[in-house]
Amino acid sequence: MFPLKFIIVGGGILGSSLYHLLKEAGHEVKVFDSGKRRVFPTLIHSLLLKGRDVELAKESLDFYRRVGVPMRELPSITLGHVPQDLITLWEGVGVKVEEKHVEWLRARGLYAKGGDRLVSIAHLIHSTPHVKAEVSVDPETFTLRANGREVKGDVIVIAAGAWNPQTVPVSSKSYYCWATLALFGTSEVGSHIIYDYEKGFYSRPLLGFGGNLAIVGDGDVIESPPGRRICVNSADVLSRVRERLGRLAPLYTAGEFCEGTPDMRPAFGKLKENVYYVGGLNGYGAEVGPGIAKLLVDFILKGEENKEYSLSRFNGLRDFRLGREPHEI
């Protein structure tokens, strides 16, 4: 296949992953990004997912390693019932799982190694060349304009995350996802990732070097167009965290806008000849983003369509409400 000129709208996890995958395949790629989205230094990458998502997470992990994205592996503790078939699935991709009592949590749970890490998403995004521009797309002709000037390419991919629903007519919504940085009385929170399905929260180290600082969350999904100032009440989440981890001092609550689909799973598909969409990372883009980008590349270049993640599964759907993020068991 002769080299194609790709235009990517959005320089986040998906846009950056597409850039590397398409360059590896020998194509010309230009990424446009508005620079509006806040880029967090690290996010969780986990293999402790469900179904086909585990394969996407494994594909994403291989991608991070191949392109040299810094990562720090951490043990994780899962509290609450986990079906045996899920444990078997995790062990099948190399995760070592042991059920044991964790003294500092005063609880019995699944202690896992090889399943979780903090990945430097900021490194991936900032190392991807992009053109800073305000982009608009005509919803009928799909003509692309960057800073008011028409941009043409052989293939256009809309990968603008929470801005996708405002850019093209797709079955997705934007929502605000947030978490709180807190100071804890135990240093164990600085070296472990916690998934507490009994109390209903997660905890991850700020940087992964140990210490008493951790980021906690799992508040309600707040549907909203991106860019608005959103005020949240973190008291409910923090009260649940205190029940498990004891005293804490909240330091800072912040968030960013995510894109959700009707079933809260990623989607990709063709909008028009040579115009494609990919999005709906639903709060777990670090886990599956590069994997879903690979599915789109295979669809465009090889005609291989994975129906489980195809945008066509939402055909005819006019209204919906966002549900729970799919990485939650």
Image (cartoon, helix red, strand yellow):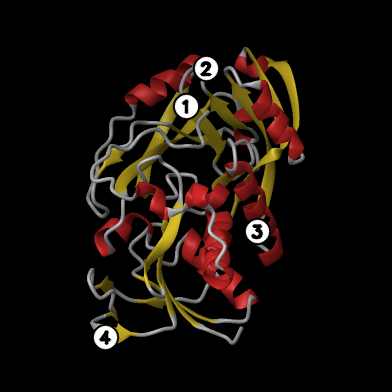
According to the picture, the residue beneath numbered tag 2 turns out to be: 244
Q: Nearer the viewer, mark 3 or mark 2?
A: 3
According to the picture, the residue beneath numbered tag 4 turns out to be: 149
Choose the circle earlier in sequence order: 4 or 1.
Answer: 4
At label 3, the amino acid type is: Tyr
At 44% across and 53% down in the image, what residue appears? 267
Choose the circle earlier in sequence order: 3 or 1.
Answer: 3
Q: CA distance from mark 3 to mark 4?
A: 34 Å
What is the crowding at mark 1: few (fewer than 14 residues within 10 Å), some, or many (at least 20)?
Answer: some
At label 1, the amino acid type is: Phe
- Residue 95 visible in the snapshot: no
The residue lying toward the viewer, choosing from 28 and 146, is 28
Which x, y percent locates residue 207?
Answer: 58, 45
The residue lying toward the viewer, choosing from 146 and 156, is 156
According to the picture, the residue beneath numbered tag 1 turns out to be: 201
At label 2, the amino acid type is: Arg
Badge count: 4
Q: Is residue 315 left or right of residue 241?
A: left
According to the picture, the residue beneath numbered tag 3 turns out to be: 64
The residue lying toward the viewer, choosing from 26 and 181, is 26
Mark 4 in CB contact with mark 1 (< 8 angstroms): no
At label 4, the amino acid type is: Arg
Choose the circle earlier in sequence order: 2 or 4.
Answer: 4
Q: CA distance from mark 4 to mark 1?
A: 46 Å
Q: CA distance from mark 3 to mark 2?
A: 33 Å
At 64% across and 60% down in the image, what residue appears? 69
Which x, y percent locates residue 94?
Answer: 77, 40
